[in-house]
Image (tube, rainbow, N blue to C red):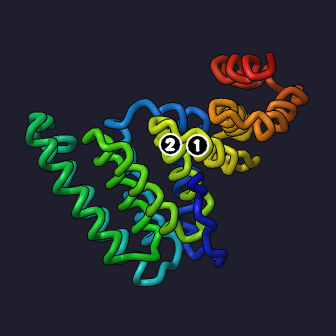
Amino acid sequence: MVRLKKKKEHNSEHEGLDEALKQIETHGDQLAHWVGENSQQVLIAIGLVLLVAASFSYGKIRHDSKEDAGFAAVGAVDYDFKRESGLISDLGESAQLANPETLKELRETYTQKFTEAADEHSGTAAAAMSLFQAGFLVSQGGDEEGAVQKWEQALDEASGNPGLESLIRTRLASGYETLDRWADAAEAYESLASEDSVYGEKRAKADAARCYLKAGDNEAAQPLIEDLRSDENLEDLPPYLKAKIEALQS
């Protein structure tokens, strides 16, 4: 069984990114559902994360020069990819998505560029975001195993930032499911089961229990199901999540 690597514990110096993520992920449960099912739109959303995070970095808090340089470099790569692929256009021009063959070549080119930017700025939150974006490009190319490897690397680069780690684990868990790595998916979801999780504590427990059951580990699934069964606030949950929990309890 491959388990998530334990992160080095240290004080986060990236409060600006934390705050940016909190604003973007106010509706964490909806975000997680959307991220898992709309990879094309995610490419645009990640650019917004980078831009918002960079604005906090320069305008609201003090960041060390290494972090600033990382965000500048990764943001530049992100912008160039979107411009060349047609996801964004120059001012006054209509955006036109590149043809499939060109997009394939651009994904390969920019996967390498995002990876190189992460290597150059290793140890920063920007490096984590760069690998996160590279993973989406690899996934869109049909290589989910390669994408998961990028997201695992991104998690290692997340610099002890809880909000950023949660965002990466959300997509990583979905990737594990795609690969039928049910035990790894369960562990990833369970790591998101905290009160301040952007994913949503109840949904994380429900998905963790579901994946443990898929893995044949009823012993690990049962405590999570019992926690959900004892919760009196299921009526406050979205219908699809309530149905998922009720199915586990039956």
Q: Residue under circle 1?
A: 185
Left or right relative to 17: residue 134 = left
Residue 37 visible in the current orientation = yes
Left or right relative to 209: residue 60 = left
Q: Nearer the viewer, residue 121 or 58?
A: 121
Residue 94 visible in the current orientation = no
Tell me which amino acid carries mark 2: Tyr
Measured along the vertical axis of the image, is residue 82 above or below residue 223?
below
Q: Position of residue 5 (x, y in %)?
A: 59, 64
Q: Name which residue lies at 61% across and 48% down.
A: 188
Residues at marks 2 and 1, CA–CA distance in whole angstroms:
5 Å
Q: Residues within 10 Å of mark 1 (few under 14, many from 20)?
A: many
Q: Position of residue 70 (x, y in %)?
A: 36, 73
Q: Name which residue lies at 27% across and 57% down.
A: 78
Q: Residues within 10 Å of mark 2 (few under 14, many from 20)?
A: many
Q: Name which residue lies at 48% across and 68% down.
A: 157
Q: Nearer the viewer, residue 39 or 108?
A: 108
Q: Which residue is at the far bottom?
A: 65
Q: Name which residue lies at 18% across and 52% down.
A: 108
| Rendering quarter of residue 189 | top right
What kind of element bears circle 1?
helix
Q: Of callouts 2 and 1, which one flags the residue occurring earlier in the amino acid sequence?
A: 2
- Find residue 145 and name its label: none
Tell me which amino acid carries mark 1: Ala
Q: Residue under circle 2?
A: 176
What kind of element bears circle 2?
helix
Total count of labels: 2
| Circle 2/circle 1 CB separation < 8 Å | yes
